[in-house]
Every structure is written in structure tokens, then in C-alpha cells.
Amino acid sequence: MLNIVIFGAPGSGKGTQSERIVEKYGINHISTGDVLRAEIKKGTELGKVAQSYIDQGQLLPDHLIVDILAATLDSFAESKGVIFDGFPRTIAQAEALKKMLAERGQAVSIMLNLDVPEEELMKRLIKRGQESGRADDNEETIKKRLVVYHNQTAPLIDWYKQEGLYAHIHGFGALETITAEICQAIDKVK
Ligand code: AMP
């Protein structure tokens, strides 16, 4: 089982690269952001709660996200592996993921950190907001999300280094080059 954590700031290309990895390795994809946006669209209770956090650029409480993740993971029976996109975003979530996988006789295989300069992140997110209409891709909310990323999510870099699972990826440049660097890192742990 290949369990990949794709990590990076908002706008670092996690979603785009995940699609390519899914296609190449035939594994499942969990994007917690996509799950929450689908809940908002369906108008569920969870969707209503999620909306208020997303609009503020804040993270949802860990226990809500961990429950969603456990349910999604169990829906992938016969899976070759999973790519976790947008999760974990806090150390508590990383610990929960480790436990959840251990209970299923598994572990994270690698954490890929898509490293992108801050001005580039800003540019990409503003462009995405104009093209896709994602409500949280406006300048004010983007700035809040980047602060949240630095304070709550970036500490996971050291956490995964300590676990011996960390891989740095240059996330800025041609899409193909980034994908190639990712595949090289994955093939080492496969
Ligand atoms: P994303 O599409 O991954 O950028 O996520 C969009 C928004 O969904 C984030 O800004 C958070 O409000 C929420 N969200 C997604 N994943 C998580 C997570 N793992 N923990 C907490 N909140 C999350």
C-alpha cells in the first residue's frame, strides 16, 4: 500500500499533482477541501459548518476532519493506496492519521512538500479565484489562509522529518518537471 501525503501551502499545486499521481499509480485520492465543498453544495449540516470556516480562511476543528477522513478511508476497500491532499494540516491531524493507518496495519509511505515561493502562491490563487470562482480565493482570505498555513500547518515539515518520511519537491517550474521529481521520490519508497 502506497500512502502518500501531498503537502504544501494553498496554491502549491497539490490538487493538480494529485490528479497526475492518481493516474500513474492507480491509487485513491482524498482531498478534504473537495469533500467539504461537496458538502456545502449538497447543503448538509456539515456543509454549513464548513462554509463558515472556509469563508474565514480558518481550519475546521480537527475532530470533524478526522471523522470525515476515517469514513472516506473505509470506503476504499481493495485499494492500492491513497494520496492525502490537504490533510493533515495540523500536528494533531498527523498523529490521528498515523494512528488510523496503524489500526489498519498501514503507515504513511512518504510526505511530499511542494515548495513554492510566496509571491507565486499569491499570484496563482488570485488567478484561480478569477477563473474558478472559488469564494476563498480572494486577496483578503488568501492572506489569512497563508498565515494559518505558516502557524498551524508548516510545523508538520519538521514533524515528518522526524518521522523520516519527508521529501522536498521544487513546486515552481514546468508541471512535467515537478511531476517527474515527485515520481522519482515515490519510486524510491514503492
Ligand atoms: P483546500 O481546498 O485544501 O485549500 O481547503 C479549503 C478549506 O477547507 C481550508 O481553507 C479549510 O478551511 C478547509 N479544510 C480543508 N482541509 C482541512 C483540514 N485538513 N483541516 C481543517 N480544515 C480543512
Image: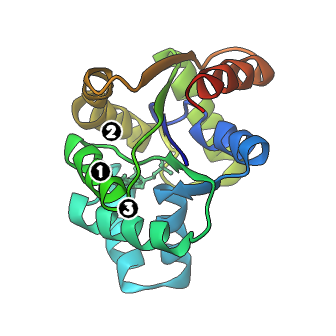
Residue at point 38%, 61% (across, down): 104
Residue 140 percent location from the top left of the image: 40, 40
Disc 1 beta carbon < 8 A from ligand 1?
yes
Give residue 133's quadrant in the image: bottom right
> First in sequence: mark 1 or mark 2?
1
Q: The residue tagged with tag 3: helix, strand or loop?
A: loop
Q: Residues within 10 Å of mark 2 (few under 14, many from 20)?
A: some
Residue 98 percent location from the top left of the image: 30, 48
Determine the CA span between mark 3 and mark 2.
36 Å
Q: How many marks?
A: 3
Q: Which residue is mark 1?
A: 58
Q: Which residue is mark 3?
A: 104
Q: Amino acid at mark 3?
A: Arg
The tag on residue 144 is: 2
Q: The residue tagged with tag 1: helix, strand or loop?
A: loop
Determine the CA span between mark 1 and mark 2.
8 Å
Disc 2 beta carbon < 8 A from ligand 1?
no
Residue 91: in sight, yes or no? yes
